[in-house]
């Protein structure tokens, strides 16, 4: 009777191994049906681009590992030696904590990334559809999803951008609130420009203009982003109508200087502007940042913001780990109460059997009795049994709250000879 | 009884202020929610207390020492609640609730003289006039807080080292909008204060310009409002400039108030 997880992830296995062990949605449903082993009662399989994990309710920890290896090898037609060095196995509370950390995105490549919760949920649902979950894994996964949600709402682990493009979007939102009615001008039509521009387009900006020294490339990118191309010579005048300037040209020197922006701001009557300079060497004169209501971030500035955000996430991760520990302890209590229940039931049955046996013997000896006499005898025997069993029952229940249920169960079983 | 309620209100605003500042460090929802609850509870209590006092003495209640300040703290919280309702700027509480607390605490200080007005000018609408003028002051306080928040956020963005403040405070655009909205809404309140105040002065002192106690800060505040409104409309004062002007204006009004009363 144990919870076991066997699997590998981005820290233990290179992508070359992970990709060969991964399951697609279709093959996962199949695999859930195919993997049958006598010691595995329940099964959930989690497969993402960063991890492949099998969560099991198993009666034998070592046997379940061997079955997993055999199954993965035949399923993917791989020699076991190719992936066994990368496998890890955890059981009982370590397995519980592992799943809670995975679901809460504490075990992710980028801590706090939000997709993993959906992936864990999908894996759980797939296992339910395949009828491979029972009461134990159901409880485990419901708790894991609950923990993940608590972590997300109570800590800031998923806040704050951790990529340069997204950090720029976040900064823009701290200036403009919403980007919906803003105009963006992109200088340059290279790959970095496109990538960063896409992030802004996804925020629903009103209009995007693209300008480039070679007009054809600007046209091409404009088509891809549903933007308007602008002749290169026209961009200085166009600054007036632009809220966000994204610059990523290969120019060897600055192309936007202080007087240019000052003039634009004068015509704009001081409405704020945000300059994002992701070109190296830089496209925009640093002095532009000194103007009122003008904000300029270059590549290094954005990297610093990302670093700061990562540190912030790490701080939040500490709080999240604490939360996970607390939830693991709660789950442990649930498990232990669950362990004590069969013993309490067995104890009652055992005593009841003795009582019935002895009662019958006595009744046979006494001969015919009046109904009220019979009932008095019943009450007498039940009373004795209940009073005697009260103490051990309370002891079992209390020990499960105190986390010593294993010893208590063993002792009670031994004392009352329940396993004989 | 009033004493107990008065202290309960003070305590609610003080605790809320502390919690708002705590939220900046903790960045957790519960402290903000608790602080908002305290402000709401304090405001409700204050509304009841002021209402009962008004009902008991509709003509004289605001002549008592401290009544205008108590009303001012009430108006500031009312302005805060309206702003939060409309803009969802919870961080505003860190700035404006302590000011409301100070006003409420100052209302409890013993004042040497109570204003006794001749019977001729005692009228219910006078109370209304004072309430509206105080709402104008509350709008000015709101502008001051949004200005301070704007300047902090602007500094964060310019410094390129966004920290806890950057996360805690809303966007510049939103803060500037709040500032404008408070200006546009507050201006009519103060204007009516000026007009009714001078009419009243004519009655009591025989001149439109020779006013009673609170007149100079009121006049100054009105000029600053007018200047800001004009600056925004005609000179394109936006963002940083408007925020600085607002903060400066508030400090001037506050200083003139102290000079006047001490």
Image (cartoon, rainbow, N blue to C red):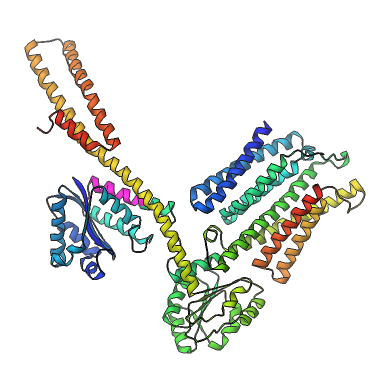
Residue found farthest to the right = B206
Q: Position of residue A409 (x, y in %)?
A: 20, 34
In percent of width and height, residue B85 lies at 59, 52
Left or right of residue B199, residue A348 in this image: left
Q: Main secondary structure of the magenta part?
A: helix
Using the rendered view, name the quadrant where residue A195 is placed: bottom left
Residue B114 x %, y %: 81, 39
Residue A10 drawn in magenta? no
Query: Residue at the spot x=42%, y=80% of the render?
Result: A224
The number of numbered discs placed on residues in the rendered structure image is 0
Residue A220 lies in what quarter of the image?
A: bottom left
Quarter of the image with the C terminus of chain A in it: top left
Residue at 19% in and 11% down: A372
Q: Is residue B9 above or below residue B246?
A: above
Residue B225 pos. (x, y %):
74, 60
- Would residue B117 be visible to someone looking at this image? yes
The range drawn in magenta is A131-147
Q: Is residue A158 visible?
A: no
Residue A140 belongs to the span the image colors magenta: yes
Query: Quadrant location of residue A348?
Result: top left
Quarter of the image with the N terminus of chain A in it: top left
Question: Left or right: A63 with respect to A169?
Answer: left
- Using the image as rendered, state which of residue A85 and residue A244 is in the foreground: A85
Give above or below for B133 relative to A12: above
What residue do we see at 24% from left, 45% from top?
A: A135
The answer to whether A245 is drawn above or below residue A412 in the figure is: below
């Amino acid at each position: 009777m144990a919870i076991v997880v066997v699997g590998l992830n981005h820290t233990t296995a290179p992508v070359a191994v992970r990709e060969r062990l991964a399951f697609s949605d279709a093959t996962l449903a199949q695999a859930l049906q195919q993997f049958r082993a006598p010691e595995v009662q329940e099964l959930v399989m989690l497969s993402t681009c960063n991890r492949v994990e099998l969560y099991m309710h198993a009666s034998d920890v070592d046997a379940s590992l061997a079955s997993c290896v055999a199954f993965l090898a035949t399923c993917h037609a791989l020699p076991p030696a190719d992936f066994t060095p990368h496998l890890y196995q955890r059981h009982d509370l370590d397995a519980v904590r592992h799943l809670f950390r995975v679901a809460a995105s504490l075990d992710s490549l980028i801590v706090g990334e939000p997709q993993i919760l959906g992936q864990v949920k999908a894996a759980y649902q797939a296992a339910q559809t395949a009828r491979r979950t029972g009461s134990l894994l159901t409880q485990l996964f419901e708790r894991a999803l609950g923990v993940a949600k608590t972590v997300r709402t109570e800590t800031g682990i998923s806040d704050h951008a951790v990529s340069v493009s997204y950090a720029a979007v976040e900064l823009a939102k701290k200036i403009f609130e919403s980007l919906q009615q803003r105009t963006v001008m992109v200088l340059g039509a290279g790959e970095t420009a496109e990538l960063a521009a896409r992030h802004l387009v996804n925020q629903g900006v009103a209009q995007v203009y693209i300008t480039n020294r070679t007009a054809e490339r600007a046209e091409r990118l404009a088509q891809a982003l549903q933007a308007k191309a602008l002749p290169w010579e026209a961009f200085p005048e166009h600054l007036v109508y632009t809220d966000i300037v994204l610059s990523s040209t290969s120019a060897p020197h600055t192309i936007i200087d202080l007087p240019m922006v000052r003039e634009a701001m004068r015509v704009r009557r001081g409405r704020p502007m945000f300059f994002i300079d992701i070109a190296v060497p830089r496209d925009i004169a640093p002095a532009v940042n000194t103007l009122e209501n003008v904000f300029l971030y270059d590549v290094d500035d954005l990297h610093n913001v990302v670093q700061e955000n990562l540190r912030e996430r790490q701080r939040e991760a500490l709080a999240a780990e604490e939360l996970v520990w607390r939830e693991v302890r709660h789950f442990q209590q649930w498990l232990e109460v669950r362990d004590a229940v069969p013993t309490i039931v067995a104890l009652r049955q055992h005593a009841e059997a003795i009582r019935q046996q002895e009662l019958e013997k006595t009744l046979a000896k006494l001969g015919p009795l009046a109904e009220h006499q019979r009932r008095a005898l019943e009450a007498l025997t039940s009373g004795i049994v209940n009073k005697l069993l009260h103490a051990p029952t309370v002891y079992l229940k209390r020990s499960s709250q105190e986390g010593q249920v294993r010893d208590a169960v063993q002792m009670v079983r031994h004392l009352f000879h329940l396993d004989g | 009884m009033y004493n107990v309620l008065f202290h309960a209100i003070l305590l609610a605003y003080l605790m809320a202020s502390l919690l708002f500042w705590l939220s900046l460090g903790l960045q957790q929802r519960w402290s903000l929610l608790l602080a908002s609850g305290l402000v709401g509870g304090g405001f409700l209590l204050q509304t009841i207390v002021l209402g009962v006092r008004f009902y008991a003495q509709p003509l004289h209640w605001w002549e008592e020492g401290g009544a205008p300040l108590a009303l001012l703290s009430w108006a500031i919280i009312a302005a805060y609640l309206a702003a939060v309702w409309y803009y969802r700027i919870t961080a505003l509480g860190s700035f404006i609730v302590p000011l409301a607390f100070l006003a409420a605490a100052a209302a409890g200080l013993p004042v040497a003289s109570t204003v006794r007005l001749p019977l001729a000018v005692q009228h219910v609408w006078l109370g209304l006039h004072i309430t509206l003028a105080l709402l104008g002051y509350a709008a000015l306080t709101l502008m001051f807080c949004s200005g301070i928040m704007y300047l902090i956020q602007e500094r964060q963005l310019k410094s390129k080292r966004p920290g806890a403040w950057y996360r805690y405070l809303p966007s510049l655009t939103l803060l500037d909008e709040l500032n404008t909205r408070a200006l546009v809404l507050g201006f009519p309140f103060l204007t009516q204060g000026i007009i009714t105040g001078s009419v009243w002065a004519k009655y009591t002192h025989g001149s439109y310009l020779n006013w009673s106690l609170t007149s100079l800060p009121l006049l100054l505040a009105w000029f600053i409002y007018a200047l800001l409104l004009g600056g925004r409309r005609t000179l394109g004062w936006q963002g940083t400039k408007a925020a600085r002007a607002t903060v400066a204006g508030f400090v001037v009004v506050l200083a003139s108030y102290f000079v006047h009363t001490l």
